[in-house]
Image: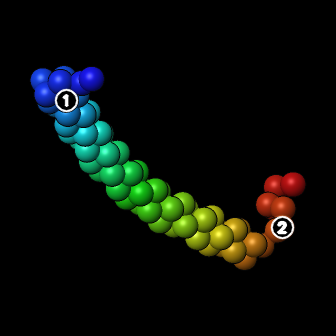
């Protein structure tokens, strides 16, 4: 049969594990939030680059496709 001190020792170990798990969970949440913010920023930058490429493509199409006079 388990005596009182063994029960207290097991309970204390469980409490310690719980504290570590809570800490890990908090750090994971913070990292996830940070990565989501990075992702949102990169998504915005990606959209800006795509729009810039579209604009450059339109500008290039507007340039006359004639050879220079020295050809």
- In this figure, which residue is indicated by the disc labeled 2? 66
Q: Quadrant of the N terminus?
A: top left
Q: Quadrant of the C terminus?
A: bottom right
Q: How far, Cα to Cα, is label 1 from label 2?
A: 90 Å
Give the crowd class for mark 1: few <14, some 14-19, many >=20 residues within 10 Å. Answer: few
Query: Which residue reaches farthest front?
Result: 1
Display coloring: rainbow
Q: Residue at x 31, y 45 (%)?
A: 25
User: Residue 67's image quarter?
Assistant: bottom right
Give the left or right position of residue 24, taking residue 53 as reference: left
Give percent across and percent down for residue 27: 28, 43
* Labelled pair 1, 2 in contact (Cβ < 8 Å): no
> In this view of the protein, can residue 10 be seen by the observer?
yes
Give the left or right position of residue 21, taking residue 71 as reference: left
The residue lying toward the viewer, choosing from 31 and 38, is 31
Give percent across and percent down for residue 20: 24, 35
Q: Secondary structure at mark 2?
A: loop
Q: 38 above or below 61?
A: above
Q: Residue at x 60, y 65 (%)?
A: 50
Q: Secondary structure at mark 1?
A: helix
- In this figure, which residue is indicated by the disc labeled 1? 7
> In this view of the protein, can residue 13 be seen by the observer?
no
The residue lying toward the viewer, choosing from 13 and 18, is 13
Q: Which mark is residue 46?
A: none
Give the crowd class for mark 2: few <14, some 14-19, many >=20 residues within 10 Å. Answer: few
Give the left or right position of residue 37, taking residue 48 as reference: left
Q: Residue at x 47, y 65 (%)?
A: 44
Give percent across and percent down for residue 43: 50, 62
The residue lying toward the viewer, choosing from 53 and 14, is 14
Give percent across and percent down for residue 36: 41, 57
């Amino acid at each position: 049969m388990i005596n009182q001190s063994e029960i207290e020792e097991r309970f204390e170990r469980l409490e310690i594990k719980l504290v570590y798990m809570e800490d890990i969970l908090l750090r994971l949440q913070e990292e996830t939030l940070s990565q989501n913010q990075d992702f949102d920023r990169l998504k915005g930058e990606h959209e800006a680059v795509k729009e810039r490429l579209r604009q450059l493509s339109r500008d290039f199409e507007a340039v006359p496709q004639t050879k220079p006079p020295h050809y």
